[in-house]
Image (cartoon, grey):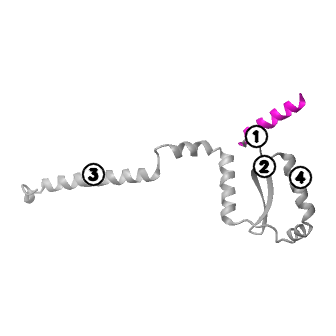
Amino acid sequence: MKAAAKEALQALKQQEEGLAPGQIYVKDVRRFAGQKVELQKAVEGAPENADEGLKKRRKTSNLGSIIEQLGSGKKISVVDKSRYDWQGYKKDEKLDEELETYKKSSNKYLDKVHFLKQAEYKEYERERDQRLNSDVRNRGRL
């Protein structure tokens, strides 16, 4: 009974966080611009497997952990950092739905620019034709 309740709670928590069933968050510490940055990644697997993998990695790489402590640990590029920041911002501001609906809608920026250019050109043609028709010297030559 308790196991079923625990699984249901875990599934509900995953839905709130936007995780698919069977996914978990794994925290990773990287260096960016001389500072330590904590990143969260959604990966496939059970929490027990993630803990075992971390323990194995810690046991087998004592030299690696010493090097990380000295400051030459894993680094993250500006592009990757920007991607993580954007994903975090979308999650915090709950923009995923809005961006998806915008992507599927007809409110594309380039379409709007094209429409405005066409409208401006048609208005210019109308004004030009009106100006030419009102000029006495050009009557009858159009």
Q: Nearer the viewer, mark 3 or mark 1?
A: 1
Q: Residue at x 47, y 49 (%)?
A: 108
Q: Which residue is mark 3?
A: 123
Q: Nearer the viewer, residue 139 or 46?
A: 46
Lower sequence index among marks 3 and 1: 1
**Crowding near the residue tagged with mark 3, few <14, some 14–19, many ≥20 C-alpha atoms within 10 Å:** few
**Crowding near the residue tagged with mark 4, few <14, some 14–19, many ≥20 C-alpha atoms within 10 Å:** few
Q: Which residue is mark 1?
A: 14
Residue 137 point in image, percent of width and height: 8, 60
Q: CA distance from mark 2 to mark 4?
A: 15 Å
Residue 16 picture quarter? top right
Q: Which residue is mark 4?
A: 52
Lower sequence index among marks 3 and 4: 4
Instruction: Check the picture and name the quadrant holding the N terminus.
Output: top right
Disc 2 residue type (three-letter) = Tyr
Q: CA distance from mark 3 to mark 4?
A: 70 Å
Disc 3 residue type (three-letter) = Glu
Disc 1 residue type (three-letter) = Gln
Residue 48 lies left or right of residue 12; in this view the side is right
Give the secondary structure at mark 3: helix
Disc 4 residue type (three-letter) = Glu
Q: Which residue is mark 2?
A: 25
Residue 83 lies left or right of residue 64; in this view the side is left
Give yes or no for contact between labels 3 and 4 (Cβ–Cβ under 8 Å): no
Residue 84 picture quarter? bottom right
Lower sequence index among marks 4 and 1: 1
Q: Looking at the magenta stretch, what is its main secondary structure?
A: helix
Q: Nearer the viewer, mark 2 or mark 4?
A: 4
Q: Residue at x 46, y 52 (%)?
A: 109
Q: Tell me the magenta residue range.
A: 1-18
